[in-house]
Amino acid sequence: MRNDERPSNDLTVETTQPSTHSETNSQPSRRIRRRSFLKGMGVTGAALSAGALLGAKTEAQSSSGPISQGDAAILRFLAAAEIIESDLWLQYQEFLGVQDNEVSTIASKQIPGYPAQPTGGNAAFTTQILRLDGDMSQYIHDNTEDELSHETFINAYLISKGFDPVSLDGFRTLPSSAATGANQVGRLTNLMELTVDTSWWTRYRSRNGNPDLGDKFPQAVPSLAVNKHPAIPRTNDDVNDADFLTAIAFTAGFHFAFIEQGGSSLYPSLAQRVNSAEVLRILLSIGATETSHFQTWHDKAGNATPLSVTDPATGVTVTFTDLTQPSGGENLQANLIMPEPTAFLSRQFPVCSVIRPTETKNAAMGAVKGLTADGLFRGQSKEFMNFITELATQADAATRGF
C-alpha cells in the first residue's frame, strides 16, 4: 500500500493565518476555494453537527491548545481513510457480523439514510466464514464498531481545534450487493470486484526483507492478486453455489487482513510528521488498534482450506492452497502470525521485529494507491478520486513546524 509517486491534483486549498498566533500553532480561518464544489457534492463539514460530534463541550475544551495546519491535514486524511474503512466493514457486518443493533444504530447516526436495525445477516455466507474461525462474527462486528468510533473521534477532534471535519456522504453512489443480508444504500467502496494483494503474508514472514528498503514479496494466494474477485456475494445466485460461496468467504478473510495491515503502517508513518504531542498520542493510540485488528485477521486467513473454483459469472478461477503445511517453507507457514525479525532502517543494524513499512515519505498517497489497486474504488467518480488525492497530498506535505 505504499508508493513514492506523488500525483498532481487540480483542487487547491487556500488558508489565511490570524495575526495572533505563530504559523505552527495557528487555528486558521480556512477559505477553501473548492468549497462551492464540495458543497454541491454534499462533502463539506456542514452536514456534520459539531454538537453531535463533540458531545459534552467541557470535555472537548479540556484538550491541549491549537494544532498546526499540517497536523490537521494528517487528521483529515485519516478521517477519510476511517470513513472508507467503515463503509467496507459495514458491508461485511451486514452479512457476517453479530446481528444485534449496536453497530447499525451507530452507523444510522453517522450515515444519512442508513437503517438503525440490523439486516439479519446471511446464514449461508456466515456458515462459510466460520470455517476460518468460530468467533468471526464477533470479530467482524467489533472491527466495524472500532472504525466507526475512529472516524467520529477524529472529526470531533478536528472541530474542537477549529478545522473542518471530513464527510464523504456525497460520494456514496456505488451499488449494494443484491444478495440477502445487504442493506440497499449507497456505498463508497466496491467489494464485488477486488484484486487482493496478499504479499503482506510473505512480507511479515521474511527475515531479511523490508519494503522500506526496496524489497518485494511474493503473493501467498497468487490468483487473488490478478483479475476481479467478489469478497461478498453479488446476488443470491452466488449464495446458492456452495463451493463458490466458500471461495468468496476465503477471499474476504484475506481481504480483512489486507485492509488492516495498511492501517498498521499508515498511522506510524504519518505519526513521524506531526507536531502536537496530543495528535501524536491520537495516532499512536488508534494505530495500535489497527495493528490489533491486523494480527487477528492474519491469524484467521491462514485457516483457509485447499480450494479451486471458477467464478460462474466471469470465468475467473481462484485457488487457495493449504498454508498450514506449506510446500514453500516458513515464508508461507500459517501459524507465523507475529512479525519475524527483519532488516530495519539499515541492513547495517541487527534484525528487529517491526511493523513494515513505516517509511513516512508519500505514506498517504501510498495508502490511496494501495486501496485503488485493490479495486475498492472501481466505479467511483473522478471527483471522489480527486478529493481523496487532495487530502493525501496535503497529509504527505505536512512537516514538523507547519
Image (tube, helix red, strand yellow):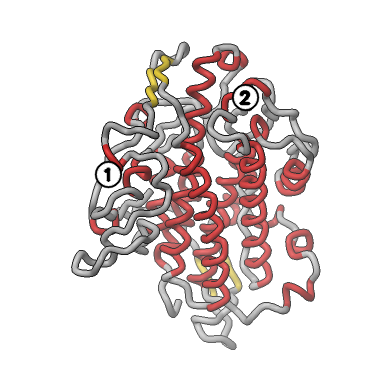
Residue 254 falls left or right of residue 323: right
Could you tell me residue 149's position as x and y percent? 67, 55
Q: From what the image shows, is residue 45 above or below residue 1?
A: below
**Residue 33 visible in the displayed image:** no
Q: Which residue is mark 2?
A: 127
**Residue 36 visible in the displayed image:** yes
Asked if the residue at tag 2 contacts the one at tag 1, i.e. Cβ–Cβ closer than 8 Å, the answer is: no
Could you tell me residue 286's position as x and y percent? 56, 61
Q: From what the image shows, is residue 14 above or below residue 58?
A: above
- Earlier sequence position, callout 1 versus callout 2: 2
- Dot 2 falls on a residue whose secondary structure is helix
**Three-letter residue code for mark 2:** Thr
Residue 202 falls left or right of residue 66: left
Q: Which residue is mark 1?
A: 217
Crowding around mark 2 (Cα neighbors within 10 Å: few <14, some 14 to 19, many 20+) is some
Residue plotted at (56% across, 80% down): 26
Residue plotted at (29% across, 58% down): 342
Crowding around mark 1 (Cα neighbors within 10 Å: few <14, some 14 to 19, many 20+) is some
Number of numbered discs visible in the structure rendering: 2
**Three-letter residue code for mark 1:** Phe
- Dot 1 falls on a residue whose secondary structure is loop
Residue 211 falls left or right of residue 67: left
Could you tell me residue 314's position as x and y percent? 43, 15
Residue 260 falls left or right of residue 180: left
Displayed quadrant of residue 210: bottom left
Question: In front of the other: label 1 or label 2?
Answer: 2
Report the quarter where the C terminus lies: bottom left
Residue plotted at (56% across, 57% down): 289
